[in-house]
Amino acid sequence: MASGIKDKVVILGMGCSRFGEHWNLGGDDLIVEAFSEAIADAGIDVHQIESAFFSQCLDQIGIGGGAVPLAAALRLPDIPVVRVENACASASDAFRGAVYAVASGAADIALAVGVEKLKDTGYGGLPQINQGTLMPQWYANYSTVGGFAQVANAYAAKYGISRDDLKRALARVSVKSHANGAKNPRAHLRKEITEEGALKAPIIAEPLGLFDCCGVSDGSAAAIVTTPEMARSLGKAGPLVAVKATQSVASNGYEAAYSGWDFTHFHTARKAAQRAYREAGITDPRSQISLTEVHDCFSITEMVTMEDLGLSDEGTAVRDVLDGHYDADGAIPCQIDGGLKCFGHPVGASGLRMLYEIYIQLQGRAGDRQLSNPTLGLTHNLGGQPSLNVCAINILGLLG
């Protein structure tokens, strides 16, 4: 039976552009910015890369379709380049492709790069993705924020949570992330907010207010991966950051088609987390996971995800959030870099941006936001709608 790829692949180098409104830069400029940092960190030449995976979700905006934009921007050495699109999980799955290429022996060194330029649309939220004949007719009138607002309301109803406690917890999620993002020079939004300000913000879809919703952005991130043996042969000294697990689960329609799902959790996230923990050899995530970067497209998504990951018991995430369990100085810091809330969400880059933060935290290079001796970090991407989605989870830790 397959046992996974724990410790078979390490990260040789990573890079991340500054996220923001880059009116003066093209997608290729952002790719080069992230890649330049990654290859300098790796200490190799571009001609040593043997395979590449390029994540981009919305090819009609700014970049163009296919894999050519990556190969041309970086002048890659006539190697296979695969474009990966899996909604908001695109970058995590590009990373998984690069990891599997190395783990399988198909390549000694592989590259994953994600990019998106969404501010060029002039639109404040995510552009609509064509779902073809899969989606029912009602989807034409469906909004993403409306769907996640349903999650918040269903969650409160199921667990008997008062409206005040729910809104205070959602506000606390955002206040925490903005406090973290203020310390990150690469984040799009770098201003702290108050709980009072979050609670008084305009309502977008009850109970979600303005500060409960992430915005879009322009940005890119990159990772170069190899085997531990190759890393050592290239002169990499000191602790290596290894891939402990990489899992992805796509909804098969269970949530939308049957009555077993009640809108209070994400089925794909629970499945992916269980498999990732098994692959990484994690038996008690609450004591073993040092930090998380999760898909906080909305505050409720982050809060419910804590239960899906087994870090909070069902119905207790509200209490844990209010108790500061996921704050920077809490038991399991979440979004220590500011998360989607403060970075913004260039869809094709977000998963790799999350991995970048875990990577530099494990190496002790995170500056003002550095945590004390982290050992295992988890990233979580949720793409699509609550009722039809894909979830990707990666776990990184020091080799050994």
Image (cartoon, rainbow, N blue to C red):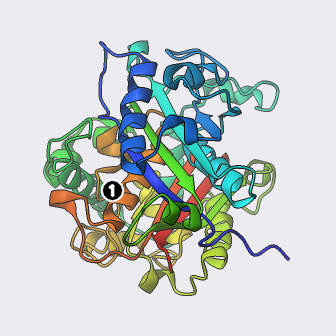
Q: Position of residue 100 (x, y in %)?
A: 69, 55
Residue at the outermost right position: 1
Please, is residue 26 above or below residue 285 in the view?
A: above
> Is residue 53 something one can see in this rendering?
yes
Residue at point 57%, 30% (across, down): 56
Residue picked out by circle 1: 170
* Disc 1 element: helix
Residue 209 is situated, as x and y percent measured from the top left of the image, at 32, 41
- Name the residue rendered at 56%, 35% in the picture: 47
Indicate the position of residue 48 as horizontal and vertical percent values: 57, 42
For the N terminus, the image quarter is bottom right
Residue type at mark 1: give it: Leu
Query: Up-down: is 278 above or below 235?
Result: below
**Residue 305 visible here:** no
Query: Residue 281, percent across and down?
Result: 61, 82
| Crowdedness near tag 1: few (<14), some (14–19) or many (≥20) residues, C-alpha within 10 Å | many
* Residue 266 picture quarter: bottom right
Give left or right: position of 255 versus 235. right
Q: Give me the residue at 66% from left, 23% from top.
A: 140
- Residue 339 lies, with reference to residue 243, above or below; the image says above
Q: Is residue 299 above or below residue 142?
A: below
Q: Residue placed at 41% from the left, 18% from the top?
A: 123
Q: Does residue 319 appear left or right of residue 83 in this picture?
A: left
The quarter holding residue 293 reads bottom left
Which of the pair 214/188 is nearer the observer? Answer: 188
Give the tally of numbered discs.
Answer: 1
The answer to which of 376 and 322 lies nearer the viewer is: 376
Out of 48 and 359, give the one closest to the viewer.
48
